[in-house]
Structures are given as structure tokens and as C-alpha cells.
């Protein structure tokens, strides 16, 4: 296949991924809306048969229709399908342009959506987190839709400064971390939305724990991404840190997530307030991704939009 | 370790100066203060990304001064053009780092003590622990201790019990991380005191020697003197760029001869390193070779003239030629250079396929070059002097390589004889960069240890033909992971002893 055909196929697969994610979102939402109130969701300790991790059984409401869990499983299959299309789209684009396929905003956002879906699907293989599905899917559908509609860039070469193995190191780490932070933010928002009473969502403390897990994984990766960025800047621009807007906002994001981690261990800062810190940090991350590229100009602008 | 620090003592007043000092120190080093300072640090950096910074975009700062002097004046008073060098930014991070030191020192002491302490005795009732399991009755204390040791636990035994602990690296990682942050700060400070940075433009065929005078722009650290510059020199032998058929830049290289000894191909992302001084290729453009003959027939200019790029995509550029030695009157010319002419005064392609130089304007009169006031090489003269010059030509006269043009009124002649390219280089020396890298790498290693390792204890009690195990972790948020690990440990402890005393764990 020629490069143009590969690139065209990649574009088609992105559309396939969007539709698969969209259907998956509907399936997850149906399960959540009609499934039983959180009865089966046990405290994580209970996953292994040993020890006293109590499974909180708090069944309530009428018996759910039998198709609800089926909708959930179908949604999961669709999410995997979307994931495969998303991955294939990225690989094909990489083949079409003969470089790492995250050289501009469009490619970058598409890769983040893959990372977020991957984080969710991997978590799902370890314990049942289907209740997150609908919301992770909303996030990736919006992300992909936004990038196709507003950020789309024709497949092509990148400026020489981006043509470096550093893109593989620095940008890949940033993508992975961002994907995990997305999952953390989704769980965080849910924990805020969920009231105290019975609900189809897991207990608030469990949601907060999931968010914490995701962020604890993401934070070192983000730290590494920032440092790798500094090393690249040292190679490309002659200084490892120069307070370019992108650098400033990476720093702010990093400090904000560090503040979240400290808040978790500070007496009197539990629950809602730590989640709000987390979401503020996520806001900084989003601004760094979108706002800085579009509104502020700096050395990173070439990664951007036309 | 989940070190939840107690909030600072409430009772502050009436303590006398020493008491106040202690109270201040305790408050400063409390977790809550650290949290607030982290927030402040993030907040304080925001203006640095929204307003142009002098160190990054001095021209934008100048623009703001022109368009709104009163506002710019105020910004400047609040250090908003130098946020990251401002006293208030420094105040936040110095407080944070003081707090950090105040946090690290006692924790290191505690940790050192803890390293030497043995795990505590097993509690009496293991079933009250968060994790608990029955074990086969024939397990002995010695066997349990042996197996736990093999799983790299630190183990003590007593009468009918085993107590085991591991995960000390968590706290170690946390300390390493926080100490590395201090290291990073010191490295940055060293770099800004002893480092320097300069920019220079070099035309093909020309050279550069690393002395302060050779730079177009030079920013030394506070403790740099002219003698401390690494002595090296090079000539730019050739410059080559490649473009896609659509005119997108694919790659470019500058071929240097360094110290008359070795050749170096300088590329983006691949700086030249001479004794720790790095030379970076940061830009390139065209320098048409122009020959100017004055009204008396003397050649007064015959050199490559570096042009400023006006259209990035096609490298259409503007150039200025000044001939202060021209007679009967000094000459100043405005030119436009197109690497590939499009026939309408523009450029069609960034490579020099069909170069064209256009004479846009010519002036005679006193250019003011002898007044001693430094002038930009990219303008003929400052506006007040321009106003007094005679404009002898205005238009757009194209020249191909080899063409010449007689200026009106016998003022002289301009000839376009060839095309060269220029590169801009940034040359930087930063003694803090390697220490900064080491600190950063340690910080990542530390944070991984601190976040991924959990501190956990496992106890075994053997009494009267029954055995049981209990476990707990002191790390919040990782209870789920520990449940799995505890299950594994129980499995290992439950495996029946084979005759040779060895068994397969899984
Ligand atoms: C430059 C400022 C600082 C940064 C960027 C920073 C960053 C971090 C990060 C990312 C963690 C996460 C590790 C974890 O959760 O275990 C952490 C943990 C911790 N930090 Fe800091 N920190 C800073 C200053 C401080 C200060 C001033 C204190 C003391 C008041 C402090 C005390 C702690 C403690 C006690 C933990 C351990 C939390 C735990 O046990 O899980 N940090 N820090």
C-alpha cells in the first residue's frame, strides 16, 4: 500500500474507533442505569479469598433485568474493538509517515485516547471496573471527536527538530501519563457526583482509591516525561529549562499533582478536598495540552495546529 | 511510611522568643504549610506563562512597553516580566525548600533509627489484624522464619511467634526523592551563577572563536569572567538543507571544521560539545553576496549580507546594505531576497533554485555611522536619521546572480554575485546540567520507590498444634495489592514441608 492509502485507512479506522467507543459507552450506560445497585462491588480486599476484607453487600431496589449485565459485557467487547481500531490507526499512520506517529496535536490526542482506553481495559482485566466504562468512553469519544474535527493534520513529515528519538521517549511518557490521569480524573469526578446514599456507583471511598491508584502510577511517569523533555530541550535548544509556556505548565501540573499526593497524607484533607485538588491538577494538564498550544506561543508551538 | 504529621501546636503566644521560634519552625515544616507552599508555587508560575518574559521574549516585552507604557511600567514594578527571577517567586520556593529541609532532617534521623530497630513482637490476637489466615498445624516457628526470610523479610522470632517486616525502601525512596529536589535546586543555581549563553550568526566560509567579543549577544552568569570561556574556534565550511517537494523542511546540517583539527556535522538535536561547552544550531537563512561600487568607481562593499527571514515557509528575506565608505555620499540599500523567484517579488520555494535579489530602495546622505551610537545591521539608520536621507530609488528591481544595476544620479552600482547561507548558533556553558540530570534521575528512582513499595508486616503464631498468620500494611491505598501478596505469603507458609525440607513455592 502507498503511504497515502495507509494514511487514508488510518483516518477511516479512527472513525471506526469513535463509533465503537460510542456504542460501548451506550452499553456501559445501560448496564449502569438498569443494573443492580452496587451489590457485587466488594471492597477490593475481598478479591482474594484470604483475610478479612469485608464485602459490603448493600442490595437495594427491584431485581434488575437480566439483559443489563449482557449490555455491560457487549460494551466491553465493543470497547476492545474500538481499542484495536484506535491502535491500528496509530500504527498505520506511523507507517504512512515513516516516523513516530505523535508529531502533532492530532496524533498526540489520538494516542492519549488509546492510552486512556488501555488503562481502563487493563484495570478491567484485574478487577471489575465496568462502572467506569461509560465515563471513560465519553472522555475518549470527546477526545477523538475533538481531534478529528479541530486538530486534524494531513499525514506528513515533521520539522527537523522533532525528528529525534527523543520524541519516542518524551512524548510516549507524556501520553501514558496523560491516559492514566484521564482515568484518575474520571474516577474523581464520579466520586464527587456520587452522593452518600445507595447508588449504582461504588462507594465514594472506593472511587477515590481508584483515582489514587491511577495517579500514583501516572505521577512517576509524568515526572519522567518532564525530565525527558528537559533533556531533549538541552539537546535541541541549548538549555534544559527555559520557562517556555509549555515548560511552565508542565511544572504547574506536576506541582499540582504533588500537592494532591501530599494532601492525601495531610490530616484533615481527606475526601472531597483532595479530589478537587486532583481535578484542578487535571485542569492544568488539559490546559497544557490544549490551551498552551493554541493560545500561548512558545517553542512548542510547532507541535501544533494549523 | 504514611507520616501524618500532627498539626502545629495551637498554643503559640506567651512562649517567649525561643518558643515563638520553635512554633514558627514547626509551622513552617508542617505538611499543611508544605501543601500551601506547593499551591503558591504553582500559582506564582502562572503569570510567567501568560506574560512575555524578558529572558525568553525580550522583543515582546519591548512591544508591550511601546503599546502601553503605563501598564508595562506596573508589570515591571511587580516583576511580571521576570517572574522566575523575581523576589516573590524566590520567596515561595526558598520557603518551600526550607520547609523541605526541616522535613527531611528529622525524617532521616527517624529512618536511620528505624533501620536499626527490630520488628516488634507479634500481637497476641492475630485475628484482629486486617489480614488473617489459618495455617497448617505442623508449621514450626523456625520453618516460618526461614520461609519469610527467603521472601526477603526482616525477621525476629520469639516464644511461639514470628514477626517479619519489609518495605523499608519506601521511606528511603521518599527521602531520596525529596533530597534530590534540593540537589536539583542547587544544580540550577550553580548553572545560573557559573554558566553563560551567547548567540552568534555565522555565514558560510566565516569562522567563530569563543571569546566574549565574538558574540552578537552574550548573557553571562553572575560569576563568569571573560577568561573562563572555553577556548575553541571553528569555520563554517558548508550548510545544506533538504526540503520535501511541498517545501517543508526535512533536515539540515552545518559542516564545521573545529580547531583546524576535526570536522563536525552540526544538526538540530546534535550539538557540538567542546569541554562541556555546547554549540547548538538554532536557525538558518540566506546571505546574498553583494558588490557595491560607489560614484567614484571604488568597490566599497563586497561581501555576503545576512538577511532576516520575513516568510518562514519560503524563506523570503529582507536585507540591508550600508556603505559608509561610499563617495561622494554614503549609501544605504534595502533589498529583498527570494531563494526561488515567483516572478512577482515573492518566493516560491525555500531552496535556492532560482535566487533573486530585488533592490527595493536606495538612500544617500549621512547614515550617522560615525556618531559612535551602536546601530542595528538590519536597518539603514534609526528613524530620526532616515528622515534626513535622500531617497534616490524606490521600487522593485529584480537581479539574478551576475546581474547589476546602476543607481540613479550616478550614485553607484550594485551587483548580485552569489548566494551563501548563514546559521545562527547558540553557545552555552552550564556546569549545573549534569548534576541536575543526576538529581532528576535520582528523583524519579526515589519517587518510584516511594509510591510503589509498601511497608508491610507479617506475623505468625504457633501454639498447641495450630498456626495462624496475620498481616498489615501501613501504606494507605495499597490494601488491595497487599491482600494479594498476603495470600501468596500464606500459600508459601502453608506448603507442606517435603522430606528433604525443600519445596516448590508455587
Ligand atoms: C519542592 C517541594 C516538594 C515536592 C515537589 C514534593 C513532592 C512529593 C511527592 C511527589 C510525594 C509523593 C510520594 C508519596 O506520596 O509517598 C511526596 C511525599 C511526601 N512529602 Fe513531599 N514534596 C515537597 C516538599 C515536601 C515538604 C516541604 C514536606 C514536609 C513538610 C514533604 C513531606 C512529604 C511526606 C511526609 C511525604 C510522604 C507521604 C507518604 O508517606 O506517603 N514534602 N512529596
Image: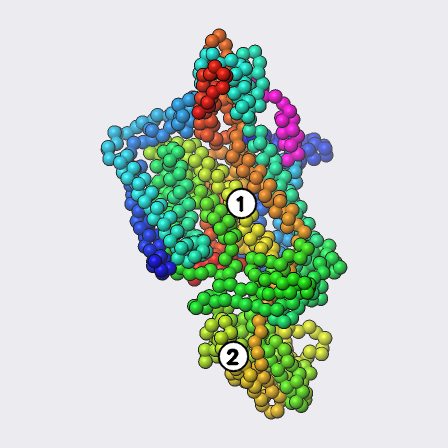
Of the 4 image quadrants, the one containing the C terminus of chain B is: top left
Across and down, in percent, residue B122 comes to: 54, 17
Q: Are marks 2 and 1 on the same chain?
A: no
Numbered range of the magenta stretch: B104-123
Position of B28 relative to B208 (above/below)? above
Of the 4 image quadrants, the one containing the N terminus of chain B is: top right
User: Is residue B121 shown in magenta?
Assistant: yes
Taking the view exactly as shown, the residue that stands out farthest to the top is B464
State whether the magenta stretch is mostly helix, strand or loop. Answer: helix
User: Is residue B486 shown in magenta?
Assistant: no
Residue tagged 2: B356
**Which quadrant holds residue B181?**
top right
Q: From the viewer's perspective, is A47 left or right of B207? A: left
Structural distance between the alpha carbons of marks 2 and 1: 49 Å
Residue tagged 1: A224
Tell which of B412 and B230 is nearer to you: B230
Q: Residue at x 58, y 55 (%)?
A: A235
Q: Which chain carries label 2?
A: B
Across and down, in percent, residue A272 comes to: 46, 37
- Looking at the rendering, the quadrant in which ligand 1 lies is top right
**Which quadrant holds residue B262?**
bottom right
Give the colour scheme of this rendering. Answer: rainbow
Position of B72 relative to A222 (above/below)? below
Taking the view exactly as shown, the residue that stands out farthest to the bottom is B409
Amino acid at each position: 500500500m502507498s503511504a497515502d492509502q495507509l494514511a487514508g485507512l488510518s483516518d477511516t479506522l479512527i472513525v471506526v474507533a469513535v463509533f465503537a467507543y460510542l456504542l460501548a459507552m451506550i452499553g456501559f450506560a445501560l448496564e449502569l442505569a438498569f443494573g443492580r445497585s452496587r451489590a457485587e462491588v466488594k471492597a477490593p480486599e475481598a478479591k482474594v479469598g484470604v483475610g478479612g476484607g469485608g464485602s459490603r453487600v448493600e442490595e437495594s431496589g427491584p431485581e434488575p433485568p437480566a439483559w443489563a449485565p449482557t449490555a455491560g459485557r457487549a460494551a466491553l467487547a465493543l470497547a476492545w474493538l474500538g481499542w484495536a481500531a484506535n491502535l491500528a490507526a496509530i500504527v498505520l499512520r506511523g507507517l504512512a509517515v515513516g516516523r513516530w506517529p505523535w508529531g502533532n496535536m492530532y496524533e498526540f490526542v489520538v494516542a492519549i485516547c488509546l492510552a486512556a482506553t488501555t488503562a481502563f481495559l487493563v484495570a478491567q482485566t484485574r478487577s471489575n471496573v465496568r462502572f467506569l466504562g461509560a465515563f471513560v468512553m465519553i472522555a475518549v469519544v470527546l477526545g477523538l471527536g475533538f481531534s478529528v474535527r479541530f486538530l486534524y493534520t494531513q499525514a506528513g513529515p515533521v520539522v527537523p527538530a522533532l525528528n529525534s528519538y527523543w520524541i519516542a521517549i518524551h512524548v510516549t511518557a507524556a501520553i501514558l501519563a496523560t491516559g492514566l490521569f484521564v482515568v484518575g480524573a474520571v474516577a474523581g469526578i464520579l466520586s464527587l457526583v456520587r452522593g452518600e446514599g445507595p447508588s449504582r456507583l461504588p462507594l465514594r471511598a472506593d472511587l477515590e482509591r481508584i483515582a489514587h491508584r491511577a495517579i500514583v502510577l501516572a505521577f512517576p511517569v509524568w515526572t519522567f516525561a518532564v525530565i525527558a523533555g528537559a533533556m531533549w530541550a538541552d539537546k535541541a535548544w541549548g538549555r534544559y529549562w527555559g520557562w517556555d509556556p509549555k515548560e511552565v505548565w508542565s511544572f504547574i501540573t506536576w506541582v499540582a499533582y504533588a500537592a494532591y499526593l501530599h494532601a492525601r497524607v495531610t490530616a484533615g484533607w481527606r475526601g472531597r478536598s483532595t479530589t478537587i485538588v486532583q481535578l484542578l491538577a487535571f485542569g492544568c494538564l488539559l490546559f497544557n495540552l490544549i490551551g498552551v498550544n493554541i493560545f500561548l506561543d512558545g517553542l512548542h508551538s510547532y507541535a501544533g495546529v494549523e | 511510611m504514611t507520616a501524618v504529621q500532627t498539626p502545629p501546636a495551637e498554643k503559640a503566644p506567651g512562649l517567649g522568643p525561643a518558643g515563638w521560634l520553635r512554633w514558627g519552625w514547626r509551622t513552617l515544616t508542617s505538611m499543611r504549610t508544605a501543601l500551601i507552599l506547593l499551591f503558591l508555587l504553582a500559582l506564582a508560575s502562572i503569570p510567567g506563562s501568560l506574560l512575555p518574559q524578558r529572558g525568553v521574549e525580550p522583543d515582546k516585552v519591548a512591544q508591550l512597553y511601546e503599546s502601553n507604557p503605563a501598564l508595562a511600567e506596573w508589570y515591571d514594578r511587580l516583576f511580571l516580566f521576570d517572574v522566575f527571577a523575581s523576589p516573590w517567586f524566590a520567596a515561595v520556593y526558598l520557603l518551600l525548600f526550607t520547609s523541605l529541609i526541616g522535613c527531611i532532617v528529622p525524617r532521616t534521623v527517624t529512618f536511620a533509627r528505624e533501620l536499626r530497630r527490630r520488628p516488634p513482637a507479634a500481637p497476641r490476637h492475630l485475628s484482629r489484624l486486617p489480614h488473617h489466615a489459618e495455617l497448617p498445624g505442623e508449621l514450626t516457628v523456625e520453618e516460618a522464619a526461614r520461609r519469610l526470610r527467603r521472601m526477603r523479610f526482616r525477621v525476629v522470632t520469639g516464644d511461639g511467634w514470628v514477626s517479619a517486616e519489609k518495605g523499608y525502601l519506601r521511606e528511603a525512596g521518599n527521602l531520596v526523592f525529596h533530597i534530590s529536589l534540593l540537589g536539583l535546586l542547587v544544580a540550577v543555581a550553580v548553572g545560573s551563577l557559573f554558566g553563560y549563553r551567547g548567540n552568534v550568526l555565522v555565514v558560510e566560509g566565516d569562522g567563530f572563536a569563543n571569546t566574549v567579543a565574538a558574540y552578537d549577544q552574550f548573557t553571562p552568569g553572575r560569576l563568569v569572567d571573560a577568561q573562563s570561556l572555553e577556548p575553541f574556534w571553528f569555520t563554517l565550511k558548508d550548510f545544506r538543507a533538504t526540503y520535501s517537494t511541498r517545501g517543508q523542511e526535512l533536515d539540515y546540517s552545518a559542516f564545521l571544521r573545529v580547531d583546524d583539527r576535526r570536522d563536525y556535522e552540526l544538526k538540530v538535536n546534535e550539538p557540538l560539545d567542546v569541554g562541556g561547552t555546547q554549540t547548538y544550531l538554532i536557525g538558518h537563512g540566506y546571505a546574498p553576496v553583494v558588490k557595491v561600487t560607489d560614484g567614484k568607481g571604488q568597490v566599497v562593499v563586497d561581501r555576503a549580507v545576512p538577511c532576516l527571514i520575513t516568510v518562514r515557509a519560503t524563506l523570503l528575506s529582507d536585507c540591508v546594505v550600508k556603505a559608509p565608505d561610499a563617495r561622494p555620499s554614503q549609501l544605504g540599500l534595502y533589498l529583498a531576497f527570494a531563494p526561488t523567484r515567483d516572478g512577482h517579488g515573492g518566493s516560491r520555494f525555500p531552496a535556492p533554485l532560482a535566487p533573486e535579489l530585488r533592490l527595493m530602495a536606495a538612500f544617500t546622505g549621512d547614515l550617522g555611522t560615525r556618531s559612535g551610537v551602536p546601530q542595528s545591521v538590519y536597518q539603514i539608520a534609526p528613524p530620526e536619521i532616515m528622515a534626513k536621507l535622500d531617497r534616490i530609488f524606490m521600487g522593485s528591481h529584480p537581479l539574478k546572480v551576475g546581474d547589476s544595476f546602476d543607481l540613479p544620479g550616478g550614485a553607484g552600482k550594485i551587483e548580485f554575485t552569489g548566494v551563501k547561507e548563514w546559521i545562527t548558533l547558540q553557545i552555552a556553558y552550564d556546569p549545573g546540567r549534569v548534576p541536575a540530570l543526576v538529581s532528576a534521575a535520582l528523583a524519579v528512582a526515589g519517587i518510584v520507590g516511594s509510591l510503589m513499595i509498601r511497608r508491610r508486616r507479617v506475623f505468625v503464631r504457633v501454639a498447641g498444634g495450630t498456626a495462624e498468620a496475620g498481616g498489615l500494611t501501613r501504606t494507605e491505598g495499597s490494601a488491595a495489592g497487599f491482600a494479594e501478596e498476603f495470600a501468596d505469603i500464606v500459600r508459601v507458609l502453608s506448603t507442606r514441608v517435603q522430606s528433604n525440607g525443600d519445596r516448590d513455592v508455587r
